[in-house]
Amino acid sequence: MVNSESVLNVLAEKVGTLLSEKGLTISTAESCTGGWVGKEFTGIPGSSKWYGTGLVTYSNHAKHNLLKVSKDSLKSHGAVSKKVVEEMAEGVKKISKSNLSIAISGIAGPSGGTKEKPVGTVCFAYSDEAGTRSYEKFFSGNRDDVRKASVKFILEEVLNNLN
């Protein structure tokens, strides 16, 4: 039986292979995943050729000060929103001067959810030369389950966009 860590590792290796083949670089801005995507990338020997910047911007203060997410977006839409993750992805891409970037912000639980945004709500953004796309997903399970599912989803999304 394949465990979820090895699945994440395989996905990250596939991303790295494609980025290397295409001569592209990627950067990450993570909130609820706490740098887990960056952990998967840096676990791959030679990843410094295609992965250079990973920021964990857990607080709104960090999102605003480091990634230049607008205070208005944070106030109007909340940290867990398509608008904010789009700004996070664009911010880290600009800082890093990478070709691609991803961003993740969500409510992993066990608390923090609302009726509109329950625990398990996660927003993602993918940014490349064609623009920035965002997604909102819901994952069930405990905190670790939500975080693992989020990492798996964004790695698959990067692969889909690179193929």
Image (cartoon, rainbow, N blue to C red):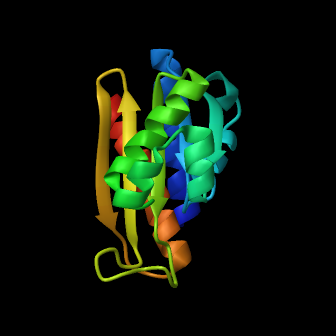
- Looking at the image, which is closer to me, 37 or 20? 37
Residue 50, how many percent across, how many down?
59, 25
Q: Residue placed at 34% from the left, 59% from the top?
A: 77
How many numbered marks are there?
Answer: 0
- Looking at the image, which is closer to me, 30 or 17? 30
Residue 11, how many percent across, how many down?
48, 46
Report if residue 41 is visible in the image.
Answer: no
Q: Quadrant of the C terminus?
A: top left
Residue 149 picture quarter: bottom left
Q: Indicate whether 75 appears above or below 47.
A: below
Report if residue 46 is visible in the image.
Answer: yes
Residue furthest toward the top?
23
- Looking at the image, which is closer to me, 109 or 14? 109
Residue 48, how many percent across, how many down?
69, 27
Q: Residue placed at 29% from the left, 52% from the top?
A: 135
- Taking the image as shown, residue 100 lies to the left or right of residue 29, namely left
- Taking the image as shown, residue 54 lies to the left or right of residue 123, namely right
Residue 139, how many percent across, how many down?
37, 72
Q: Residue placed at 28% from the left, 76% from the top?
A: 116
Residue 33 picture quarter: bottom right
Q: Indicate whether 122 appears above or below 116.
A: above
